[in-house]
Image: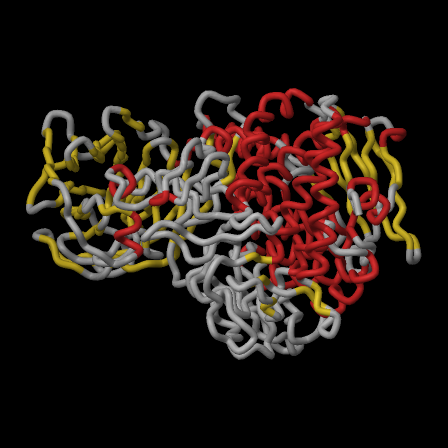
Amino acid sequence: MPFKVQVGPPQIAIHQAMTVLVTESDGQINWPGDKGLYFFDTRLISAWSVYANGTKWDLLNGGAVNFDAARVFLTNQPFLTEDGPIPSQTLAFEISRVLDQGLHEDLDITNYGQKPVRFNLEIAIRSDFADVFDVKAKRDIRRGHINSDWTETRQTLRTTYRNADFSRSVAVSVGKSDSRAVLANGRLSFEVKVPPGGRWHCCLMYEFADGDKRYHAPKDCAADSGLSSQAKAHRDWRETVLKLRTSNEEFYRFYHQAIDDMAALRLPIEGTDHMVFLPAAGLPWFMAPFGRDSLIVSLQNILVYPEFARGSLEVLGGWQARQRDDFRDAEPGKIMHELRYGELAHFKLIPHTPYYGTADATPLYLVTLHAAWRATGDISLLQRFLPNAQAALDWIDEYGDRDGDLFQEYQTRSPVGYENMAWKDAGDSMVYADGSPVRGPKALCELQGYVYDAWVRMAEVFDALKQLDRARALRQKAAALFTKFNQAFWDEDAGFYAYMLDGEKQRVMTVASNPGHLLWSGIVPPDRAARVVGRLMQPDMNSGWGIRTLSSKHPAFNPYSYQNGSVWPHDNSLIALGFKRYGFSAEAGHIARDISEAASYFLLNQLPELYAGVQRDGANFPVQYLGANVPQAWAAGSCFALLQAMLGIQPDAPANTLYVDPDLPPWLPDVTLTDLRLGKKHLDIRFCRDGDKTRWEVLRGDAKLVKYRGAVQAREALGVA
């Protein structure tokens, strides 16, 4: 591929759990700016720069070598010393960093000159302890007090921030070093002496503290980081997840980068097995627990790593709202949107403690519970999370349906709440056909689909738990919603569903991608599915790099906007699953091809959160959206959902059966899956095109477990309409 698209300005971003380090390409942190070392939503280091006798270094190359490690190669500009001049490019300076609890930083200087050198290496470090929300808003507000202490004997510089009972600190200690440090003029200074061909080395250890809890830096240098517990956990992850081989190099790279991205975005859950995680949303701003994001990512990963679903159910169930709190848009039974840990959240100056401004996370919690059970066969999951599920069902009835008309509506009650509470949460994303903003409680189409799907799935759950009356009641409600929704939202002339009903219960006939989610949820009658699919595949919606969020014919269309014309990979992956659910395999494969080809243009085959909805014309490439998160969890997860759509895999572990309905497109002639889990069983399966059919062969495991069932038949078996 002759051209690779880079997302965002050049920078280096590494992270581990809820610690994120974002620097310039030369490894430094320039202030003012938004880069820095962030720890639980607080910027511990806001400036970091290094000098040789006061002279800056020149960048050669720098980048992340893993999600938790980076390496930068610098060389010297000419500078003077008392022993004489040092010519340019005679010193090599390598900065290596590894995050694991704390940060380990290696500084290595090699003298390629023919004379010994002696100079001062100075490192300037500043800590502003800014809240991540203040940084994003470009607010420079100091609410507390900062103190720094240098301990000569321990070679440690500790900087502490306190505001009442909120405290953060960072301690920078000199580890193994060829010379001692002094603190002068606010800088750590080392006298560096290097003979010709010699090398000077120093380790800096960054320890973080959240109140009384300390996070120690790894002791091993970056060269030995492969021996760390973090490296072992990554190897365990790679051994555990679903593995893929294919002759299509493009999709192979897409898949394996997605696996690495998901490894990077795991948040460990305290008190659980070391392989149970909650998926974070994305780097650099969203390394935090989320509701909607974590649930959709768990569904995308259900074949690849079902433990994500277990982690999401655990964490989000633990934070499920117990009482009404209008400032946080909380209501009993509601699943949260976002949880933050910084100073603003600590003092409740923002509602993210957690904030509950999402209308879709609660039904998606129920969908995820069912999917996790079907993938694992673990009925104890249903028993464990049944109280959460019942509270979520009650919320749907009592609060999600604000006016008792069977439809889900949302509107914030908080003075700082979100205007929009679905996945399209931008303030300008909900527009009438003339481009003006929709006001009042909004009944988005996909919310009705999610609730329908949740009721249908939970009916099956109650069947399994022998609560047949509750199952019957949910199926009756789902049938009533199916009928009423298709009467109220369908427009026969347009052959499409309304985007939403506004506050006056009038249809908003804006053409957007949201009705594609209705196919995924199964709320569309079969005789209407072809018209929905056909409308989404029209050129004004299908950019050639994926389906746009908004029609290019709409007055509000802007391909460079956040959600009014851009392309979101996760949106496309759910639409592709919906296409497959109604038997439109070719169209699902078409979307998969567009997204996979788009991924091939991005650096590392790494899909960003979104990209511009510019029309593909055969001579261009996908265009970045400025500010997109990368890596981003549901962008990476889109690869897995697209694969599931093409193979038609339907796990039914409770019935000890893996149903498949494969239809590989010509561009992807073969796929071999290794360690595909069905409950506690493992299968290796090869899928291969044979003419216009796709055959499969079980290479390992019990072949009798794998059976054909058409995706349409599967939808009919689950649905009530």
Q: In front: 544, or 7?
A: 544
The correct choice, above or below, for 153 with respect to 135 in the image is above
The answer to which image quadrant residue 697 occupies is top right
Residue at point 35%, 29% (across, down): 218
Residue 272 in the image: state x and y as whole percent: 50, 22
Q: Residue furthest right?
A: 691
Q: Total marks drawn? A: 0
Q: Residue at x 49, y 38 (%)?
A: 334
Would you say 268 lies left or right of 176 here? right
User: Which residue lies at the image location 64% right of the left edge and 25% below the top edge?
Assistant: 382
**Residue 455, image x, y percentages:** 68, 39
Taking the image as shown, residue 399 lies to the left or right of residue 307, namely left
Looking at the image, which residue is at 75% across and 33% down?
472
Question: Coloured how?
Answer: secondary structure
Residue 714 in the image, given as x and y percentages of width and height: 82, 43
Q: Is residue 213 above or below residue 366?
A: above
Residue 91 percent across, percent down from the top left: 27, 52
Camera sees residue 623? no
The single residue placed furthest to the front in the displayed view is 404
Question: In which quadrant of the rendered image does the N terminus lie?
Answer: bottom right
Whether residue 277 is visible to the viewer of this picture, yes or no, is yes
Viewer-nearest residue: 498 or 692: 498
